[in-house]
Image: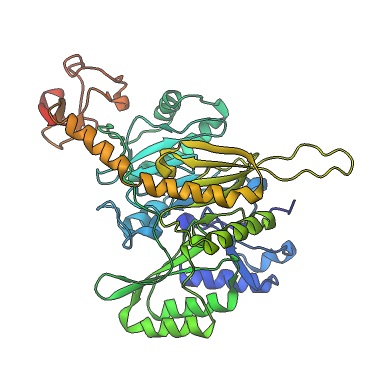
Amino acid sequence: MMNEPYRLRINGGVVSPGELKYICEAAEGLGLDAISFGSRQDIIFPEKIDKSKFGKFDKIQFIKPKKDGIENIVSSYVSADILSSTSWLTSDRYLYVIEQFKHKLSLRVNVTDPKQRLVPLFTGNINFIASEHEDYWYLYVRLPGWRKTQMYPALIYSWDMDKIELAIENILQEEPETIETLFELVSDAIDTNNRTVDKPLEVPFYPFPYYEGMNRIGTDGYWLGLYWRNNRYDLAFLKAMCDLCSENKIGKISITPWKSFIVKGIPSKSKLQWEKLLGKFGINVRHSMLEMNWHVPVNNKDALSLKKYLVTNFDQNDISTYGLTFGITSHESDTYNFTSIVIEKNKQPEAIGDFKIRDTYNLLYAKKFDPNTLEYIMHVQDVDKVELPGLLMELSQLYFEQLGTEDDDEKTVEIASETSEEEVYQCKDCLTVYNEVYGDMTQNIAKNTTFDSLPETYECSLCEAPKSHFEKKVLVK
């Protein structure tokens, strides 16, 4: 097993051209010719490096997550302006939110928009997911040792996110086992501007986007996505690219969880300059989606070899995998799956003598082929490598057959229940909704508590208006 490589924490996967150029120069000074990207939007030094030289690069903190217990924060900043998004969650808002997290995180934190597809929502221990209410976030928690991800019973204010994450880190030693216990402990520890959960999180389904090449953005600009199949990004190219970013006044470069990166805001007048740069370094920006949408462990030669074998088979059979994502993992892996289809390598039993045991695999797919459902279905178990291409093609056909039918079913349910009505109570001052189904855990009001049975001292969780300022509204469902 390879020694864990050194990484650099890149807050939210966002780095300035100046910072990236400094990192490239540091990598060169440490004897490297390339850097890699990790699935948590961090930067990886793929080769062994001499740590005695770290002192020369004092702006960088070199970490090994498993050894040092420091995690990177993941964000969908990369998707802002180029993919579907929640209206209030702009690029600037992401940066303000991410900037809060100054301390060294010991938990995995995700800050995401549910309307994009490029960055997974639930792969953190602490998952902040934008709500429709400006500057308020759903929080989904899966602490180490928890088997399931659970929804925190309040919406979190943007400027409380770091404070709440730190409180949860400090509470870990008490080993909270339920989300209700965690909520009580956090509420006792800190003051927050929580808001009542008034409706469930809705995560629309979109096919996985194509994220490579030069793409138009707005009326006078482009974004560029770059993917290298070996995940070894040449330092000379990256330095030249950072210089061009600075020349074009591009302030940020975004790393994706797919071991690639995106440059947004390329001016139309500079498009030719960028094409010349790519040509000069022989950069290919036309990879097939067959090979781009894979999550493969870093520096794992067996996994890379398996991916190459499967992609070649897909290519030879002219198979379309548009919208699907694939992951290769091991049965004992502690990482969360975030792809539509998972190829899981089984642990081999102990061999006796010279007896050779072949590798076997399990195939799982996400419910509706949407990893955000957090539900995986076992398709087959203990199959040989040679059986995988045919079975994966079978799964891709199943995906295309059911594509759209789930939505039709959901529409049917909505139409069937069109005549049903739901009573809620809305604050006349700030329009916050009290829904009896969800109660109001911000004020210790249990689920299914009727509005009439609320104490007369009840106040709006957002603007503190009295109970008398709420009026009944009927929602037609």
Residue placed at 55% from the left, 78% from the top?
Answer: 237
Residue projecting furthest to the right = 353
Foreground pick, 463 / 182: 182
Q: Using the rendered image of the protein, determine whether residue 339 is visible from the camera's viewpoint.
A: no
In which quadrant of the rendered view does residue 405 lie? top left
Q: Using the rendered image of the protein, determine whether residue 328 is visible from the camera's viewpoint.
A: yes
Could you say where residue 300 lies in the image, as x and y percent from the top left?
A: 67, 55
Q: Horizontal placement of 105 versus 270: left or right?
A: right
Q: Horizontal placement of 313 versus 198: left or right?
A: right
Residue placed at 24% from the left, 73% from the top?
Answer: 219
Could you say where residue 2 lies in the image, as x and y percent from the top left?
A: 73, 54
Residue projecting furthest to the top = 453
Could you say where residue 182 lies in the image, as x and y percent from the top left?
A: 45, 27
In which quadrant of the rendered view does residue 84 lie? bottom left
Could you say where residue 391 lies in the image, as x and y percent from the top left?
A: 55, 47
Q: How many marks?
A: 0
- Above or below, 280 against 123 in this view is below
Foreground pick, 266 / 18: 266
- Above or below, 290 against 204 in this view is below
